[in-house]
Image (spheres, rainbow, N blue to C red):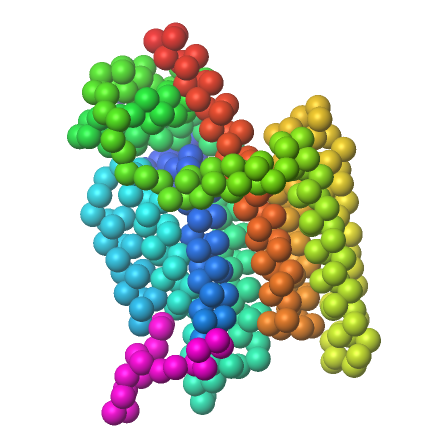
Amino acid sequence: MTGSRASVVRERPLLLRWGLPRDPSASRHLAGFLVAAVVTVLLTRALLAASGYPQLGGDGLHIAHVLWGGLLMAVAFVLLLSFAGPVVRPAGALVGGVGFGLFVDEVGKFVTSDNDYFYEPTAALIYATVVGLVLVGEALHGRREHRPEERVAGAADHAVAGIVGGMTERARTEAHGLLERTDGVRGAREVRALLDAVEEDATELPNPIDRVAAWVVHGLRRLVSARWVPWVTVGVLVVTTALTVSRGLVAWFQGEDVPGWVVTALLVSAAVSATTALTGLAVVRRDRPRAYRLFRRAVLVSLLVTQVFVFRLEEWAATAGLVADLLVLGVVVAELSQMESDAQRAAGRRDQRRS
């Protein structure tokens, strides 16, 4: 028995053998972290410009906001290291994202000899940092579906919070949804029984990331009916791409010292983004989840490739396109999250009936 168990474990990927299962909710947490960071940078720059760039301190002291960023990141670490279970992670992601935004906003001071906050390539450096983190997140969570063992671990993680504080019906259904199609995994039956044994409790800590996602979906659907959401999404994405590319080309024609390959890459990436979005629009009626995954891919191409080259041409003037892309990405991710939650609740109800 022991030998067969060891052979099963040896066949699993190295991360699982090290005891590092991926969190099924990690993509939402990472998205919340990065969106909070980018929004913090934009708001900080806007507020400082509107207030005349005031300085806190005196008598030779200057309390830069990078210090507040470090403090908030430390608070996020304390939260994440202090409490077991999944409940604290959304709050940690949000606090950490704001802290990281305040930190990275001052990168110009630390790559220049004269501590120049207004160092011209700062926007590109911040953008490249965010792009790098997005790519790391995609490499960890976006390419491979979660393994059954990871889903069982995620359900057991939900049970950790339920053991001490009880579970709401929503949380119990979500945890049972993770256990669907995991019957061959050792421990799945025991985790299912543990979830059923956890006491009922209607109180839970609000999840700020899920609340914002639900608010985005609800707010958008008050403006347009659900059947118009894909058209609005693709329309905004295509128009934004056309405008940002046009501005980049105008800057180039006006004499910006930019290699021709940058302009070529700008045009190619914009075409790929627009084509992917239109493909999603073509399939949205027969396969809505696939269509929204295509929309997400189109926005990511725009954010991770097209906007990088626009920033190379126009620096901070390109932030309008970045904000528009982030809003579209928020809508698409919120819709996908809503669909995944609905599917997971349905799977959870089936799992509960079966158990």
The residue that appears at 47% across and 18% down in the rendered structure is: 346
**Vertical position of residue 180 compared to residue 139: above or below:** above
Residue 114 position in % (x across, y down)? 45, 89
Residue 53 painted magenta? yes
**In terms of depth relative to the viewer, which is nearer, 80 or 117?**
117
**Quadrant of the image for the C terminus?**
top left
**In terms of depth relative to the viewer, which is nearer, 57 or 76?**
57
Viewed as shown, does residue 266 lie left or right of 346? right
Viewed as shown, does residue 251 lie left or right of 49? right
Q: Of all residues shown, which one is farthest toward the bottom?
A: 59
The residue that appears at 26% across and 57% down in the rendered structure is: 75
Stretch in magenta: 49-66
**Vertical position of residue 115 compared to residue 323: above or below:** below
Residue 66 position in % (x across, y down)? 36, 72
The residue that appears at 23% across and 54% down in the rendered structure is: 78
Can residue 290 be seen here?
no
| Snapshot quadrant of residue 29 | top left
**Vertical position of residue 92 compared to residue 350: above or below:** below
Residue 209 painted magenta? no
Residue 171 position in % (x across, y down)? 34, 27
**Quadrant of the image for the N terminus?**
top left
**In terms of depth relative to the viewer, which is nearer, 151 or 292?**
292
Q: Of all residues shown, which one is farthest toward the right?
A: 253
| Snapshot quadrant of residue 228 | top right
Viewed as shown, does residue 202 lie left or right of 27? left
The residue that appears at 39% across and 82% down in the rendered structure is: 54
Residue 53 position in % (x across, y down)? 43, 81
Can residue 87 be seen here?
yes
**Vertical position of residue 253 compared to residue 11: above or below:** below
| Snapshot quadrant of residue 248 | bottom right
Number of numbered markers:
0
